[in-house]
């Protein structure tokens, strides 16, 4: 077995020669998985109804996965989900408004 002046085995690869320098304009981007994102409250920009859930988006990590309960359209007027905006109200606030009794509401419908 041959050794060099530092008593290193000459069969060992010199890893200093394997350095690859990336170009200055190289950008490394880590794709984040959006499959398990939480539900949110949305307001349709067309009919102004509120709905809770997720807008259908394609995950860059899992492009073949489809979540059947994600919205592609408004569930009330069928406008594209791109018209929906995230609501500032919470779902419990919206439910309170929808279930509130109006004054002089004696109708029992």
Image (cartoon, rainbow, N blue to C red):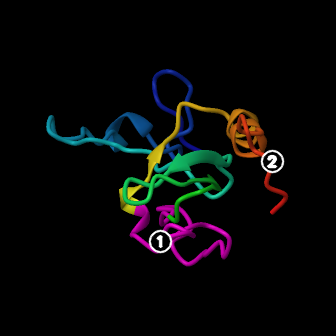
Q: What residue is disc 2 on?
A: 106
Q: Is residue 2 left or right of residue 102?
A: left
Q: Residue 40, percent across and down?
A: 62, 45
| Foreground residue among 99 and 12 | 99
Furthest residue in direction top, as rendered: 6
The residue lying at 69 percent from left, 38 percent from top is 97
The residue lying at 67 percent from left, 34 percent from top is 90
Q: Residue 65, percent across and down?
A: 61, 74
Q: Is residue 100 left or right of residue 68?
A: right
Q: Compared with residue 85, is residue 97 higher up or lower down, i.e. above or below?
A: above
> How many marks do you count on the picture?
2
Distance between mark 1 and mark 2 Cα atoms: 29 Å
- Quarter of the C terminus within the rendering: bottom right
Q: Which residues are magenta?
A: 57-81
Q: Compared with residue 11, is residue 94 higher up or lower down, i.e. above or below?
A: above
Callout 2 environment at 10 Å: few (<14), some (14 to 19), or many (20+)? few
Question: Is residue 21 on the magenta stretch?
Answer: no
| Foreground residue among 13 and 99 | 99
The secondary structure that dominates the magenta segment is loop
- Circles 1 and 2: CB atoms closer than 8 Å: no
Q: What residue is disc 1 on?
A: 77
| Foreground residue among 102 and 18 | 102
Furthest residue in direction right, as rendered: 108
| Foreground residue among 44 and 35 | 44
């Amino acid at each position: 077995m041959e050794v060099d002046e530092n008593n290193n085995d000459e069969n060992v690869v010199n890893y200093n020669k394997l350095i690859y320098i990336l170009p200055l304009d190289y950008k490394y981007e880590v794709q984040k998985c959006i499959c398990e994102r939480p539900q949110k409250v949305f307001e349709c920009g067309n009919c102004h109804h509120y709905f809770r859930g997720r807008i259908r988006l394609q995950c860059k990590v899992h492009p073949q996965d489809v979540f059947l309960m994600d919205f592609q359209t408004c569930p009330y007027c069928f406008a594209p989900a791109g018209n929906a905006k995230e609501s500032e109200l919470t779902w419990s606030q919206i439910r309170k408004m929808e279930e509130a009794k109006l004054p002089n509401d004696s109708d029992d419908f």
